[in-house]
């Protein structure tokens, strides 16, 4: 990793809520404290012919499980909606509550709970069987119907004259997890997407613990799938990812839960996204060495277990094309993949821009100034 | 218009190519000369709940037909690909060559030549009848096939088991114009999209004249529809739009051509875009007082004939959602529409952000610092 932007021992977060024990002194000292002026954002450029046509600005950081900021670009204290990039955190109650085991669900369902899937048959069939096993019906799902991201699946639906359902919603795995937990706990299913519902309050508590943030009164909004998304400093999001990578300082039950989630996340790249998605392609190339998850509006997270680090990223303008290339560049800088592994997925590092005739007319690439591999 | 950013008498461009006469001294003096440091870009913000989730940076300017920059934000000297926002300029040879009249084509075809249409039946039927009248076949079109922008039309195609064709390409009107001009001039049709082809060279000359720029050696790339797009300073793009608004200093034949184009552009808002598009909605609301055209990667242009001014805009990251809101804000600042007219299209000034359940969860709006109406 490049040392140009290294700020060792900035404390990025620490879990001092809810009576959990602490073993790292930084954590015990308090919340995010990223002092000093923010570094400049780094940029992703979109070329066409001989000109850079458009530019995206990225804020990002790499953090370890002790809350140390190893590298940072741009303001990482400002609150960001993590959107779908933290589905791994939202899956924690599904495991910790015992709901997953009680219904005889396994790794595949857990991976799907962490996914933003394409709505392909393998995804929707798994949701369908999961719902059946738990005794849920389509009417219980409050995520809304969505045309599948996968174009072939979407076209198939139209050809068959079928409307998409909530099962096709890219978040249907996460919602299955919410409903399963609520059912297991005997909570009312209706309204489980609302901020006040125990399902969302439980998740809010888990996110507070994992990020080391007091999120009472934090800015929040309604996500695409109708659940709350909470504003969290970018550095604290990376810190939570680092604690999935290295849960040594977490209480035993929490450590066991995140270890199980990380294993499911890494073993089922296809379930996390699907055909042609960045997350699936990168994780397949990494062979389990990196867990990655993008979210809407240009947010991305990565977990690198072997190094015990987490990465969080926000494209200021929200563009997915820049998020993917930026996340690949940051992951590359950690050395978590070999260059031989990258060579099999060059389109993740520099994404070709094709026009309607299929001609390569430009590319999306990191601008100058990114850390080297 | 707010005077905060006014820099009167900066000369933005001037036509001194190709032997055209000059009546404005600024024009005779030379090319874009926007001296002084660039002003700050203005921003468009995307909110969700209580947080600004994403931010887009815009460069923009308002210029008159004398080449005076009336207002500017950000660097307007840097080259920008105008993409589809200058289809009005690309239509000039269709009129000036006499091709339009020779084939008995009219206002509707001319409007369609300036359009980025939705591929709805009214658009594709007009392309089809135009092609037939000129003796063109689908094989002559080199723009590539495209799934229609209009979702209902796209779904209809899938239901009927039909593949989209080049006629559905949003640029098929522009390409019809290219082919019609080439046919009229007896030029080879094959390869008309190439930089070296007389069709594109003729357009390059027209753009040089209208923008007052020497574009020999200018950066260029291949557009979505396979034709060249040329890098031009943003201020010079606005200047060309101003000369459509007020062609008094143009040679008679050119003035006649742009007047005819402007009339066709303004009279047929639906042909320029289609159902649900910004361009169509804004022009319908304006009732002919404003001509507007967006382009890919966040470029937008507007022509306000009564005031003799042109507007050009580039969202630095290329986002269409920001382009539309920014263009509306700039047009509003000119007073070209009454507040009663704006009240009929509030979604153009502040675009609602809906989630998958159809709930309004945020909005796309100008940030603080934009000029007031």
Image: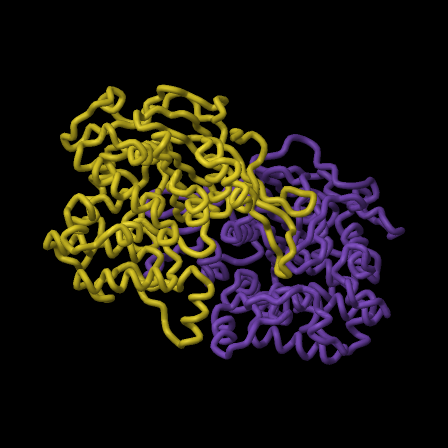
Chain colours: A yellow, B purple
Please state the horizontal and vertical placement of residue B131, each as a whole percent of the image.
71, 76
Let me know if residue A233 appears in the view: no
Q: Who's the residue at 48% across and 22% down the image?
A: A3
Q: Nearer the viewer, residue B206 or B269?
A: B206
Horizontal side, residue A7 vs residue A171: left or right = right
Please state the horizontal and vertical placement of residue A95, each as a whole percent of the image.
20, 46
In this view, which residue lies farthest toward the right? B19
Let me know if residue A34 appears in the view: yes
The answer to whether residue B93 is above or below residue A298 is below
Q: Who's the residue at 51% across and 71% down the image?
A: B154
Q: Nearer the viewer, residue B266 or B99?
A: B99
Q: Nearer the viewer, residue B72 or A289?
A: A289
Please state the horizontal and vertical placement of residue B9, each as a whole percent of the image.
71, 39
Q: Splitting the image into 4 quarters, where does residue A310 fall?
A: top left
Q: Splitting the image into 4 quarters, where does residue A92 fall?
A: top left
Q: Who's the residue at 84% across and 67% down the image?
A: B187
The answer to whether residue B362 is above or below residue A210 is below
The answer to whether residue A137 is above or below residue A16 is below
The answer to whether residue A80 is above or below residue A25 is below
Q: Who's the residue at 57% across and 76% down the image?
A: B121
Horizontal side, residue B81 vs residue B178: left or right = left
Please state the horizontal and vertical placement of residue A7, each as a whole percent of the image.
41, 21
In this view, which residue lies farthest toward the left? A186
The mark total stands at 0
């Amino acid at each position: 990793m490049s040392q140009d932007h290294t700020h060792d021992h900035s404390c990025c977060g620490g879990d001092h809520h809810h009576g959990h024990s602490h073993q790292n002194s930084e954590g015990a000292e308090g919340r995010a404290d990223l002092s000093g002026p923010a570094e400049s954002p780094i940029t992703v450029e979109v070329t066409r012919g001989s000109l850079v046509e458009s530019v995206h600005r990225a804020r990002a950081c790499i953090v370890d499980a002790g809350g140390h900021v190893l590298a940072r670009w741009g303001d990482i204290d400002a609150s960001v909606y993590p959107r779908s990039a933290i589905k791994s955190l939202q899956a924690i109650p599904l495991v910790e509550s015992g709901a997953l085991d009680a219904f005889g669900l396994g790794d595949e369902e857990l991976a799907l709970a962490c996914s933003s899937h394409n709505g392909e048959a393998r995804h929707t069939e798994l949701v369908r069987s999961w719902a059946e096993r738990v005794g849920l019906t389509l009417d219980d799902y409050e995520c809304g119907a969505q045309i599948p991201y996968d174009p072939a699946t979407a076209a198939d639906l139209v050809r068959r004259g079928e409307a998409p359902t909530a099962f096709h919603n890219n978040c249907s795995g996460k919602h299955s997890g919410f409903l399963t937990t609520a059912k297991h706990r005997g909570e009312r299913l209706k309204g489980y997407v609302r901020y006040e519902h125990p399902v969302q309050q439980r998740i809010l508590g888990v996110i507070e613990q994992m990020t080391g943030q007091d999120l009472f009164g934090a800015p929040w909004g309604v996500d695409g799938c109708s659940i709350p998304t909470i504003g969290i400093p970018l550095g604290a999001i990376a810190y939570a990812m680092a604690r999935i990578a290295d849960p040594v300082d977490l209480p035993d039950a929490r450590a066991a839960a995140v270890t199980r989630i990380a294993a499911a996340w890494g073993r089922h790249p296809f379930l996390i996204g699907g055909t042609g998605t960045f997350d699936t392609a990168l994780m397949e190339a990494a062979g389990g060495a990196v867990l990655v998850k993008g979210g809407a509006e240009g947010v991305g997270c990565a977990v690198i277990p072997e190094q015990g680090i987490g990465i969080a990223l926000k494209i200021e303008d929200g563009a997915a094309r820049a998020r993917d290339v930026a996340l690949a560049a940051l992951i590359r800088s950690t050395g978590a993949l070999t260059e031989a592994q990258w060579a099999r997925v060059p389109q993740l590092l520099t994404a070709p821009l094709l026009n309607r005739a299929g001609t390569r007319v430009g590319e999306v690439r990191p601008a100058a100034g990114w850390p080297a591999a």
